[in-house]
Image (cartoon, rainbow, N blue to C red):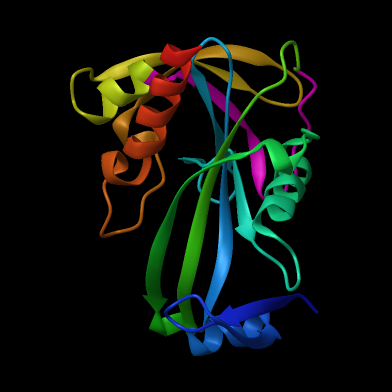
Amino acid sequence: MEKLDIYDEYMNKIGTESRQTVHERGLWHKTVHCWIYDEDGNVYFQIRADSGKLYTTASGHVLAAETVRDAFQREIYEEIGLNIDGADAIPLEIVFWRQDKPQKNWHDRAFAHVYKNKLPVGFSNFSFQESEVTGLVRINAKDCLDLLTDKKASVGATKITIDKTIDVNIAKNDFLVAPDETPIIKYGFVLQSIIQQNLLV
């Protein structure tokens, strides 16, 4: 059974509970949102298996006794097959996330730790956790920001799946957001950070 450390609202650890109990009772816990970018200023979004929408490169719960950086390394490897050292990941922000689905008796209270890391030069041998991810979409971060701020109606991108790589066009409604979110609120800060990172290189 998957166990998660639980916290008070000030991020002080107060115990450990099963993942099921954490979500039934709406207990605060940690998650990690993992972002990969490359030297050409592209960002990698995963294609969610359940919705077909674009989301973080990888993400998931931070397990009991696991560090956020260890969780970053594990999630990136599990979901897209990239083995990198989580110690090199760059922290961006911590988002206090709340969402309830009373009809499913599911309540989320998460400290979402957002980290980014650069893709090793020349790496292309992705593999995907098929229950979670069907592939990746590689988009220029500046083009993506222009799309989410309505400067462009669509942008060209590259879709990477287990058996092929093809050119695609991406629109604003291709991104996964919660009912009370917008794509620019959810993804804008990460995109700006990646753009700035590449300007500094």
Magenta stretch in the rendered image? 124-141
What residue appears at the point 18 percent right and 19 percent down from the top-left corner? 151
Position of residue 60 in the picture relative to residue 109 (left or right):
right
Is residue 10 visible in the rendered structure shown here? Answer: yes
Say if 16 sits above or below 122 in the image. below
Where residue 101 sits, quadrant-wise, is: bottom left
- Please count the marks in the image: 0
Is residue 131 visible in the rendered structure shown here? Answer: no
Position of residue 143 in the picture relative to residue 105 (left or right):
left
What residue appears at the point 39 percent right and 77 percent down from the top-left corner? 100
Task: Tell me the quadrant of the picture where the N terminus can be found.
Answer: bottom right
129 falls in the magenta region: yes
Q: Nearer the viewer, residue 111 or 82?
A: 111
Say if 98 sits above or below 162 in the image. below
- Residue 30 in percent (x, y) is at 57, 67
- Residue 93 in percent (x, y) is at 43, 50
Where residue 137 sits, quadrant-wise, is: top right
Say if 138 sits above or below 74 in the image. above
What residue appears at the point 74 percent right and 45 percent down from the top-left corner? 73
Q: Which of 56 and 71 is in front in this view?
A: 71
Q: Nearer the viewer, residue 159 or 87?
A: 87
What residue appears at the point 57 percent right and 61 percent down from the top-left corner? 31
Where residue 159 sits, quadrant-wise, is: top right
155 falls in the magenta region: no
Q: Nearer the viewer, residue 181 or 172?
A: 181
- Residue 29 in percent (x, y) is at 56, 74
- Residue 139 in percent (x, y) is at 47, 19
